[in-house]
Image (tube, helix red, strand yellow):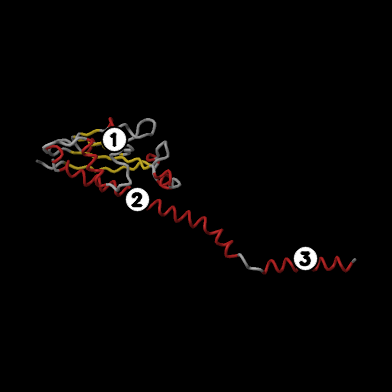
Amino acid sequence: MRMQSSLRSWAMPTRLRRFAKDDKGTTAIEFAAVIGPFLFLLFGIFSVGFYFFVTFSLEHAVETASRVIRTGQAQNGTTPLTVDTFKSLICQKLPPFMACGTTGDKIRVNVQNYAGYGSIAAPSCLDSNGDLIPKANQVYAPGASSSIVLVGVCYEWELSKAMASIPYWISPTSARMNNGSTLIQAATTFTNEPW
């Protein structure tokens, strides 16, 4: 009986030693430990890159479309532009995935003229509830020759909700909408050319 219990005590450490020396499956364990943070980092890089792509696309569209106001074509053409026709000029320059001019229109345009650069005040694109202003509240006043004009465009980027809200985390507090979307804004200020 004594011999049997001593054999058992000797056999148990041997099993533990064999288990400790066995390195089968360590790659799978290391992979499982590393894949989560790696995918989070990779997804974060794509999200931030896409956020900046949307921002720069909006800025480019605003700069390009504002040229017709700056040169007087919007005011003096055969048919002067309205807020909707000016918005369509912006929409033509945006990537197709940005909801613009459709039933899910997420873009608001504000064009205002001022007497001097010191009197410029950026209009808000959000109402008191933190939602986009209604389309009826958009302002379109492109001014006359040599007027100082501010063109501001706001875009409600809903895709940020689907992207683990990473762009929502990096955006400033003022760009965080109540529904979880991110508000992306682009603006340009200029003096109309004399015409």
Residue positioned 31% across, 31% down in the render = 134
Secondary element type, mark 1: loop
Mark positioned earlier in the residue sequence (1 or 2): 2
Residue positioned 39% across, 44% down in the render = 159
Residue 169 at x, y = what percent?
Answer: 43, 45
CA–CA distance between discs 2 and 3? 60 Å
In this view, the mark in front (3 or 1): 3
Q: Name the residue under label 3.
A: 12
Residue 133 at x, y = what percent?
Answer: 32, 33
Secondary element type, mark 3: helix
Q: At label 3, which amino acid type do we have?
A: Met
The circle drawn on residue 63 is none
| Dots 3, 1 in contact, CB < 8 A | no
105 lies left or right of 117: right
Question: Can you say which quadrant of the picture contains the C terminus?
Answer: top left
Residue furthest to the right in view is: 1
Q: At label 1, which amino acid type do we have?
A: Pro
In this view, the mark in front (2 or 3): 3
Q: Name the residue under label 1.
A: 123
Foreground residue among 112 and 58:
58
Residue 93 at x, y = what percent?
Answer: 25, 47
CA–CA distance between discs 1 and 2? 23 Å
17 lies left or right of 44: right
Mark positioned earlier in the residue sequence (2 or 3): 3
Residue furthest to the left in view is: 195
Foreground residue among 104 and 134:
104
187 lies left or right of 180: left
Q: Name the residue under label 2.
A: 52
